[in-house]
Amino acid sequence: MSAHCIITERKGLLVNVTIEELAPCKKLMRVELDAKEVDAAFESMVKDFQRSASLPGFRPGKAPREMVLRRYDKDIQDEVKKKLIPDAYRKAIDEKKLDVVGAPDIEEIQFGKGQPLQFAATVETAPEFQLPEYKGLPAKRESAKVTDEDVEKAINLLRERQVNFQTVDRPAANGDVAVVNYTGTSGGKPLTEIAPTARGLTEQKNFWVNMEPNSFIPGFADQLLGAKAGDKRTVNVDFPADFVTPQLANLKGTYEVEVVEIKQKVLPALDEAFAKGYGAESLEKLREGVRKDLENELTYKQNKAVRNQLIDELLRRVSFELPESAVAHETRNVVYNIVRENQQRGIGREVIEKEKDAIYSAAAESAKTRVKAGFLLAKIAEKEEIKVSQQEVLNRIQSLATMYQIPPEKFIKDLQQRNGVVEIYDQLANEKVIDFLQQNAKIEEVAPQPGKAA
């Protein structure tokens, strides 16, 4: 592509700046600095070295200029270059009002005493686009409510946390736990021959199986119903297509199972003592607190669903090119999060490695959406003059430091090392913009979808 925007000026350090469009969001900026400016920088740097130089036979700061030049010539050149190029680059960016994304790729073309400094900087810039209409975006909100049944389900979950297990001498029934020993095969082979990492699926002693549908491996628990301690059973299963161990997906498995004992779940009594165990004055107060928590959770889910619809609609209304470096940076962040989440779920490194192409592909698409949304929200914030105060940033940092149990000073230092403070500012600004979009949206109340939990 041909060069454009050739401008010659004398403001500060700048003498000449030429900008060439390489691709959408990518520019080549050529900068030339007058030889007089270069010589002045050399002279100033030589004096700095003279003041601090310590050479044999001379007191610090008293060595002759010529000796300092001979001794530190390369160091002086390096320091002048380290000062002039960044200064000239920043001024060039300011002069041309470029919104640069990421770090520049700088190539030195000419540098030396008595001659102009010339360098080229390849930069990526924020995309240029017209904001679509962002007030009055449509969204639907389900008008669900917390019911008495929802409260009772939540209370029972609290009881489950304090469950005791009592060994019983009777056949296994729904809701019990069967303690079993087992060995598993597929096609007559131990499962570890098919999936080397599946040792736990191949053989276990005293393994607890909840007598509930789809517990452990779908269909496994159902075939133990009615069994008593000492019974032996052959259990046949079909490993599902999305099984956690991919090598076993869609295969048939056979388990030789010995029932060691049957345990019955014993829930705590639903009384005042139970309520006080959760910090409530009475059972009635516990129910009130649970209802309030459920209502807060429901409101959060409703708002999240609305906000996601607003972002999707905003993204749909405009199209523009994205800076490659911004997408690449965000892709790395998404990949890191996906890998971390999978590891926390117990998925092995070998499985993750085999799925790396699919992980990267999914991460790249997600990253593009996030980057595009980021530019849109930033432009709306600028137009609506939505700002984040320093105190708001500090409050968020304090909250995060408390959540991660890290001293605030150390947390701030860690953030500064990876430019994390800017990320927190951007997060807060985006939240404010999405609040603004929600306040100005056209939200339609709709009935909950059948079968969907509140």
Image: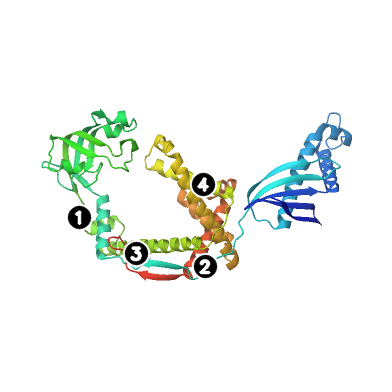
Which tag, 3 or 2, sits closer to the chain's start?
2
| Camera-nearest residue between 170 and 14 | 14
Amino acid tagged 4 = Thr
For marks 3 and 1, give the CA distance: 25 Å
Whether residue 419 appears in this view of the structure is no
Residue farthest to the left? 170
Percent position of residue 413, x then y: 57, 47
- Quarter of the image holding residue 390? bottom right
Amino acid tagged 3 = Glu
Label 2: which secondary element: loop
Which tag is nearer the camera, tag 1 or tag 4? 4
Specify whether 406 is left or right of 302.
right
Label 3: which secondary element: helix
Residue 383 vertical placement versus 257 (above, below): below
Which residue is the site of mark 4? 331
Label 1: which secondary element: loop
Percent position of residue 61, x then y: 84, 38
For marks 4 and 2, give the CA distance: 27 Å
Residue 269 shows which numbered tag?
1
- How packed is label 1: few (under 14 Cα within 10 Å), some, or many (20 or more)? few
Specify whether 204 is left or right of 340.
left
For marks 1 and 4, give the CA distance: 51 Å
Residue 421 vertical placement versus 249 (above, below): below
Which residue is the site of mark 3? 295
Which tag is nearer the camera, tag 2 or tag 1? 2
- How packed is label 4: few (under 14 Cα within 10 Å), some, or many (20 or more)? many
For marks 4 and 3, give the CA distance: 35 Å
- The residue drawn where x is 41% and y is 45% is 341
Amino acid tagged 1 = Ala
